[in-house]
Amino acid sequence: METVVSGIRPTGNLHLGNYFGALRNFIKMQNENRCFFFVADLHSLTTHPKPDDLAGNVKQILSEYIASGLDPEKVTLFIQSDVPEISEMYVLLNMLAYVGELERTVSFKDKVRKQQNNVNAGLLTYPVLMAVDILIHRPGKVPVGKDQEQHLEMTRIYARRFNNLYGVKLFPEPDAYNFGNDLIKIPGLDGAGKMGKSENNGIFLIDDEQTITKKVMRALTDSGPVAPNTEMPEVIRNLFTLLKVVSSPDTVQYFTDKYNSCQIRYGELKKQIAEDICKITLPIRRQIIDIRENTEYLNKIAKLGAEKARESASKTLYEVKKIIGFNRF
Ligand code: TRP
């Protein structure tokens, strides 16, 4: 059984892109692997969230993951700051991270450009903390998107550096978990790339029926095909991508035929998409609301997750400290 670790940033509500992307894969993975999934609340401090927002976002994201099918009995689902071993190992691993290489990280350079008035040291050492999140459970695989590849490469560098410096084989060098064809990219509704957090292009799991219908009906289209069997422009292809994800093959065929024979009515297509999205998301929405209100349950889940994560983390930290030369007597 492979050990898998991944962190989730507590920012904003989950949208369909998250649901049909990473989240679906997490849910599939939970049956075959030893999974550690956590809410990266320490990482989120780099942008100085208000305390109430931070607490609310952590609660929301946990509720959404559980409501979507992540099973806290199967995976170790925890909150990063509940595991003090992570912070302790962060101090130790920082000694192996060179400032020069951290300054050259793409994500850091990006932040320096975008938040010039808050270039804090936590941003600089973000990859070190992430490496600790991962290495502390000594996993083989890390399911992350392309944007995290450099961070994962740095994780491997630190693992190797530690092993070499102390002449040990403590840390494996984890690979990215390759979703291959399973990773569906959900387009946004504004005809501009993939679905993101913006209200204009995202449909969120927490959206109600009215909101979803309004958003889908507002999605960009064109004036319709002018000749049979012509290639679809991007905005229309995007709608069909959504349709394929949420509707039955028969329905997809029906609208494809309509398009190819120039008889398509975009209003009808959108109505169908909205209906089928609702069939999937409304039951999840109800669960999210139930779970979110059940503070007792959430506390229980977080406590259980923290216990399991600490058990694994403390084993690694113990080894690390022994190797470094602490615990001598
Ligand atoms: N940096 C990741 C992101 O922005 C979140 C993250 C933090 C993470 N620690 C991690 C991902 C460890 C995987 C493993 O999405």
Image (cartoon, grey):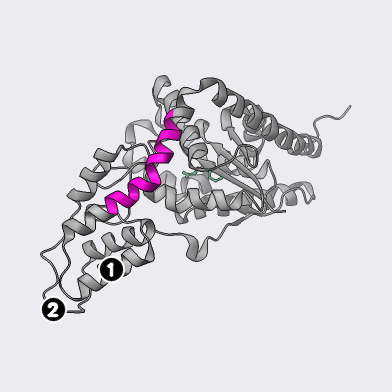
Q: Residue at x 66, y 29 (%)?
A: 304
Q: Which mark is residue 126?
A: none
Q: How many marks?
A: 2
Q: Is mark 2 within 8 Å of ligand 1?
A: no
Query: In this rendering, would 93 be left or right of 248?
Result: right
Q: Is residue 279 magenta?
A: yes
Q: Which callout, 1 or 2, points at the residue further toward the start of the chain? A: 2
Residue 320 percent coordinates (x, y): 75, 38
Q: Nearer the viewer, mark 1 or mark 2?
A: 1
Alpha-carbon span between mark 1 and mark 2: 18 Å
Q: Are marks 1 and 2 in contact (CB under 8 Å)?
A: no
Residue span colored magenta: 273-289
Query: Which residue is under mark 1?
Result: 254
* Quadrant of the image containing the C terminus: top right
Q: Find residue 299 and report its image quarter.
A: top right
Residue 248 drawn in magenta: no
How many C-alpha atoms fall within 10 Å of the one at disc 2: few (<14), some, or many (≥20)? few
For disc 2, the marked residue is 227
Q: Amino acid at mark 2?
A: Ala
Q: Residue at x 86, y 30 (%)?
A: 328
Q: Residue at x 59, y 28 (%)?
A: 302
The answer to whether the residue bearing label 1 lies less than 8 angstroms from the nearest atom of ligand 1 is no
* Three-letter amino acid code of the residue under disc 1: Tyr
Side (left or right) of 28 relative to 312: left
Q: Characterize the magenta stretch by its predominant secondary structure.
A: helix
Q: Is residue 191 visible?
A: no
In the rendered image, residue 98, in percent from the top left (x then y), is placed at 57, 44
Of residues 79 and 167, the one drawn nearer to the viewer in this rendering: 79
